[in-house]
Image: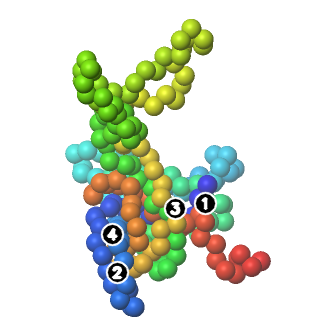
Amino acid sequence: MNTNVGLIGKKLGCTQIFADDGTVLRVTVIEAGPCVVLGKRTPERDGYSALQIGWGRKRDKAVRKPEKGFFDKIGVQPVAVVRELRVPPEVAARYQVGQSIAVSDVFRVGQKVDVQGRTKGRGFTGVVKRWNFKGSRTSTHGTHEYQRHGGAIGTRLTPGRTFPGMRMAGRYGNEKLTVLSLRLVKIVESENLLLVEGGVPGPNEGIVLVRPGVKDVAPAAAAS
């Protein structure tokens, strides 16, 4: 489990930049933060330690009365996206409700980050697209409309049922996915932009959560 504070943002798209040695780097641009601290969870009161953060601006017409009462109580404008991040108590103690968190407060160039998002939804698909089935090569001798079928799923009399997890047609995509250890190539603080090397799950304008990499161990910490 990642116990580092992260930022909510949205994926803007992919581009390429040139490194100092002329190498072309394929990067994904993420607009991350600034996020606001909406609440804190403590072991004494809640049984665990976490920070509740929000990002974006929610239209006044879309804010329900209970939500408006919550945001008015803490003195924060209604936000569009809310996430709760598990962090150690000593990390949660550094932040106060209503505090804003910017990219420069969490990230540094060159570190590894983990990016979580929802993959592109592709609807109800067959086994060829969903599971990369080869399909049937036979198109003669009485075979009709069977080129992209999944084949038999029966198990005869014993055990007489279809096993769970059978690869079949169904909903494909729109699943939570986390990509680990993407290198943070560049930070544009004035525009709250993070440029990470590699691909990020989800479509452009999709909501993502960026956190310092759970596998990114500092050399000093690794030596100790």
Q: Earlier in the sequence, mark 3 or mark 1?
A: 1
Of the two numbered discs 4 and 1 in the rendering, the one whose residue sits closer to the viewer: 4
Mark 2 Cα shell of 10 Å, populated few (<14), some (14-19), many (≥20) = few
For badge 3, the amino acid type reads Leu
Q: Is residue 23 visible?
A: yes
Q: Which mark is residue 24?
A: 2
The residues bearing labels 3 and 1 have C-alpha atoms spaced at a distance of 14 Å
For badge 1, the amino acid type reads Thr
89 w.r.t. 18: above or below: above
Q: Residue furthest left?
A: 61
Residue 114, image x, y percentages: 50, 63
Of the two numbered discs 2 and 4 in the rendering, the one whose residue sits closer to the viewer: 2
**162 or 175, nearer to the observer:** 162
Q: Residue furthest front?
A: 141
The residues bearing labels 4 and 3 have C-alpha atoms spaced at a distance of 16 Å
Image quarter (top left, top right, bottom left or bottom right) of the C terminus: bottom right
The residue under label 4 is 29
The residue under label 3 is 180
Local SS, label 3: strand
For badge 4, the amino acid type reads Val
Q: Is residue 66 visible?
A: no
Mark 4 Cα shell of 10 Å, populated few (<14), some (14-19), many (≥20) = many
Mark 1 Cα shell of 10 Å, populated few (<14), some (14-19), many (≥20) = some
What coloring was used for the rendering?
rainbow
